[in-house]
Amino acid sequence: MDQPLTDVDEYIGYGTPPGADQDCDFLQALVGLDGSRSAKLLDLACGVGRHALRMAQRGFTVIGVDFSEERIQYATAEANRLALTNCQFVVGDLRVLHLDTTFDYAYSFFNTFSCFVDNNELPGILQGVRNCLVPRGRLVIQVGSLWGSIADGKFKNDSYEQTSERGGLTRKVSGTLRIARTNNIYQHNRVIQYIKDGVEYPPKESKGTQRMFSINEWDLLCRLTGFEVESKYSRMDINSKLEKDEVYENASNDSELIVVLRRREG
């Protein structure tokens, strides 16, 4: 096969983990804690709309934003197929977010914010989202939490090879993980090849730089951008609320951090 796998096929096959229904259960429960049975939602970096479509089916009004025109076209077609009139998708860059409406909640799942490693961009992104929220509106962000793995020596400079299969699509990955010595940045350099129905797609190189966030860093970012940290969760479970910012002993193996930021007024 001379042509690589399309962006949408790759995104659906391996760009998203399973568990979208659980994510939406969490988000719906979170909105319920606010005393609301409905809310207007903004899905940041919505991809092919796996969360937005589900939340619209649950009765919420949702607008999804993503930089990929191909993914937005796919998500729009799915909304039309499902006859969802309360769900729209638009092409947009979170770094220059301009929308003509406001939202009760914005959310970004699947570690998207880890890709914003430039400190010149991140405050502007948060301020742009803040401008899209109603007074005391919320921003819900899911990021990977690697501090426990680092403390246990499990996340470290390494080389690896992985083979996995989803829905008849096989992915072979060989790569290296490198962690910055003086910063909270890490980098994956990979060669990825897909195989489907016995057909091998051409390998492609993938280089990704990401950042790790701590609760302390979110607190500081909030102070700079007009938010405040309202609550923290260790996984997509409304019962996993973190009551302490520092846990030294008997820490769980959860590898997620979900922060709920509330728009601060004044």
Image: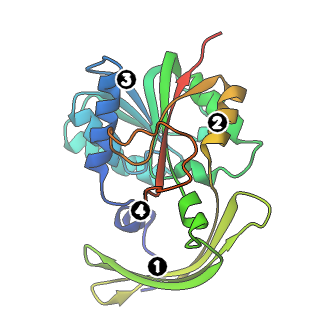
| Residue linked to disc 4 | 11
Q: Nearer the viewer, mark 4 or mark 3?
A: 3
Instruction: Tell me the crowding category of disc 4: few under 14, some 14 to 19, or many 20 or more residues within 10 angstroms, Cα based.
Output: some
Alpha carbon separation for disc pair 1 and 3: 40 Å
Q: Are marks 1 and 3 in contact (CB under 8 Å)?
A: no
Q: CA distance from mark 1 to mark 2?
A: 35 Å
Indicate which disc, 3 or 2, sits on the residue closer to the N terminus: 3
Residue 14: percent from left, percent from top: 39, 67
Going by the picture, which residue comes out furthest to the front? 249
Classify 117 as above or below 95.
Answer: below
Q: Which residue is mark 2?
A: 125
Q: Kindly report which numbered mark, 4 or 2, lies closer to the viewer in this rendering.
A: 2
Query: Helix, strand or loop at disc 4?
Result: helix
Q: Which residue is mark 1?
A: 3
Q: Badge 3 is on which residue?
A: 40
Left or right placement of residue 152 versus residue 142 in this view = right
- Of mark 1 and mark 4, the one earlier in the sequence is 1
Q: Amino acid at mark 1?
A: Gln
